[in-house]
Image (cartoon, rainbow, N blue to C red):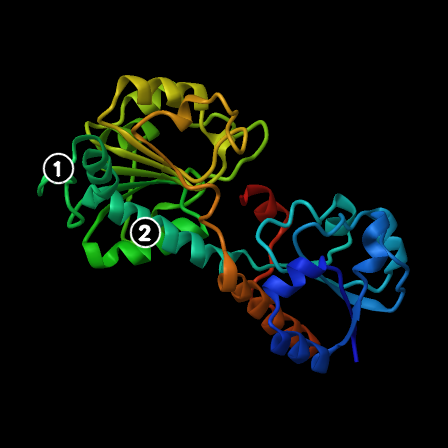
Amino acid sequence: MKVALLAVHPMVRDVVFAPAVLKDIGRAVELRDVTADLASGRWPGHPDAELVITGWGTPRIDGDALSSMPRLAAVFHAAGSVRDVTSEELWNRGIQVVSAADANNESVADFVLAQIVLALKGSHRAGAVMRSEQRLPGFRAGPGTLRQAVGLVSFGSIARKVRERLARFDADVLVWDPYVDDADLASSRVRRAASLEELFATSAVVSVHTPLVPGATEHLITADLLARLRPGAVFLNTSRGAVVDQAALVSVLGERPDVLAVLDVTWPEPPDPESPLFDLANVVLTGHSAGSVGTENQRMGDLVRDEVLAFADAQTLKHTVTRDQARLRA
């Protein structure tokens, strides 16, 4: 039986892994809980370990860690981005890395769809009118959900799931993503935006899904782009706050009360106590709640369970990521 190290904080373990799921894993591999051993920030010596299960807060598997686990063949990360646990030494050894991002992304896509529907229905604006004027806003609160233009900035896993959910609304989905080819976009029934400028100028809702890649996507969303938002547009960010020039966003929102921003992420996070984002009437802050919460976290544990069982049975893993993919994912 293969030896597996469970290297997740007890709080994370209890949120992500249902007891029955851990039992399933324990029947397929010899599962050793090494969380207490990781308190020092160093990996314990388990020379017979062939796989590790990681999560939020797990120390990076660097050269020293690999030296203590010479038989390590696979890492199963019960969270999204694997950047914090992987190292160049790990990638260079050809160790398989599984991410549970696809499971977490279901929750984000649900949240994005909900916010798009609320935006197009005009619910946030209607609430503001009710509070300030004590009246019903009428049927002109929003443009409506049917056949609206929705712009997706980047077309990764979450954006693709959002697109699937938008199908019932007959949405005109416009995508900007230089890493996706035309055939892929066509098969997904979306249109390629000629530029970010076009996407911002023509979409009723602009939803940002670009990962934060230092030196590449910081402040990708500029003042010029934000100024191009069409009248009454909604700007939605569930990616990372630093992808947006936040000072420019504050400026545009201050000058354009017709534009609504729904921000699940900011930079810094949370915003500075004196940030205008707390006072602007056309800003909705959702406190980084788009990702998995409560029982939704168990989707990630279920995915890891299925992949560990496949590994133990020498089957092909479905959710592995490469070094290049890990670099480009949020």
Residue 137 at x, y percent in the picture: 12, 38
Give the residue number, with chain letter if any, for mark 2.
113
Query: Which quadrant of the structure image shows residue 234?
Result: top left
Residue 89 at x, y percent in the picture: 79, 47
Q: Residue at x 53, y 36 (%)?
A: 212
- Image check: 117 left or right of 31? left
Q: Amino acid at mark 2?
A: Leu
Give the residue number, with chain letter if any, for mark 1.
135
Which of the pair 290/85 is nearer the observer? 290
Element class at badge 1: loop
Residue 310 at x, y percent in the picture: 63, 75
Q: Which mark is residue 296?
A: none
- Image check: 155 left or right of 296? left
Query: Which quadrant of the structure image shows residue 202?
Result: top left
Element class at badge 2: helix
Residue closest to the far bottom? 27
| Circle 2 residues within 10 Å: few <14, some 14–19, many ≥20 | some
- Image check: 44 left or right of 117? right
Q: Residue at x 60, y 42 (%)?
A: 327
Residue 254 at x, y percent in the picture: 31, 19
Q: Amino acid at mark 1?
A: Arg
